[in-house]
Amino acid sequence: MPSCFDEINVTEPSLKPVLEKVSRGERLSRNDGLALEHSDDLHAICGLADCVRKRMHGSRVGYIVNVHVDYTNICSSGCRFCAFGRSDKDDDSYLLNSNDITVRIPEGVDEIHIVGGINPDLKLGFFTGLLSDLRDKFPDAVLKTFSAVEIQGLARRENLSISEVLKSLKDAGLGMIPGGGAEILDPEIRSEICPDKATADEYIDVHRKAHELGIPSNTTMLYGHIEAPEHRIDHLLRLRDLQDETNGIIAHIPLPYLHGANELSERAHPQSGILDLKVMAISRLLLDNVPHIKSYWRALGIRMAQVALRAGADDMDGTIGQEEIMHEAGSDAPRSLGPDHLEQIIKDAGLEPYRRDALHRPIEEVVK
Ligand code: V47
């Protein structure tokens, strides 16, 4: 019986060895990644990633009933791609307390995703207090809260080590770390787009320390601004190296840069659906040790997120609600999608939806 890979028609000679390696299950090199980046054979690249997704997950695509709450937009980082951050002097700056946050969370969610700006006024007690309130009120939901850059900022303000902060957060109920803050893990690009935020090494280190303490995490990559193909490949290889070391990454989420209301837009590459599919596919192909690749519909838009399910992604994230970061940056996707809608999107891609928990375990198999 012909395998999925036999049906791929590679037109460019540079992709032939990549096809052979992927079909044999061999790891791709940096040069292979660059060959994929520099190829125009979108059909072959997406086809390869689709075959890998199928080999790893069959026809199953996950989604989660979750909620995103962005607890503060007060941020000292001033990232040039961001439309969300404010100074505390701005009229529309905000900080939600634990009660404001809990009233925004619907009953029955399986994951609570909470992130915010690097707010210089917030101490460890704010974060541990919030986590224990959420744990009391939503004992069945995984608390996927505070990105690596927020944790790094908190440790610096409190003069504590990353592990000390993570232990306190874990004791208070932290279940998992979301992937935000990775942007592009290259010092020169970071100096242009987010000079005052945690460095690439610091981002990796928070994830490494979390994994050492048994806290899993997701990772992201913000692409389509001023980075070059080499930066994207090196970013993915850094994540792959970390995963070889710790095996703590559950899912990787490629994030397309959205141009709305931010400083970087004048210098950035125009948005490209071709790049969206290529980056999704290359993420699946290079991150051979990361179980899940998410198609984040809030950033990609519903249609592109659906097509990306045939370019390597095996997950749609979730019902979301509330999220502000993509909304402020001009996302035209709805604020929220119901489970039935998500299921239909997946079915229309010819795939089989399953509802999952934050660790991507099918919900019917999770014993609470
Ligand atoms: O770190 C900010 C990005 C991230 C823009 O872990 C922008 O499951 C596009 O990390 N255009 C936060 N992106 C979102 C995030 C995330 C999302 C979904 C799931 C998970 C997960 C994590 O949003 C930031 C930054 O990279 N971002 N501004 C913008 N203009």
Image (cartoon, rainbow, N blue to C red):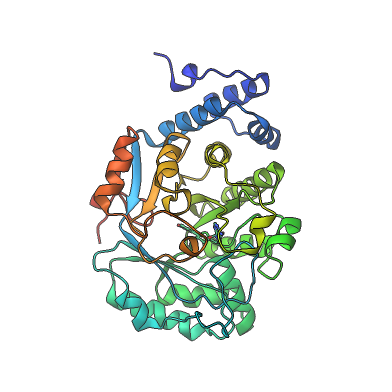
Question: Taking 308 as reference, is 325 above or below it?
Answer: below
Is 97 left, or right, of 121 in this rendering? left
Is 357 left, or right, of 277 in this rendering? left
**Residue lying farthest to the top in this orientation:** 1
Query: Which residue is depicted at the point 61% across and 57% down?
Result: 183
Is 103 left, or right, of 68 in this rendering? left
Give the image quarter of residue 41: top right
* Rendered location of residue 60, percent (x, y): 33, 38
Give the image quarter of residue 155: bottom right
Q: Is residue 365 visible?
A: no
**Residue lying farthest to the right in this orientation:** 188
Which quadrant would the C terminus be assigned to in this image? bottom left
Query: Which residue is depicted at the point 52% across and 59% down?
Result: 179
Q: Count of labels shown?
A: 0
Q: Is residue 16 visible?
A: yes
Is 111 left, or right, of 238 in this rendering? left
* Rendered location of residue 153, percent (x, y): 61, 75
Query: Which residue is depicted at the point 39% across and 13% down?
Result: 1
* Rendered location of residue 246, percent (x, y): 56, 54
* Rendered location of residue 48, percent (x, y): 51, 28
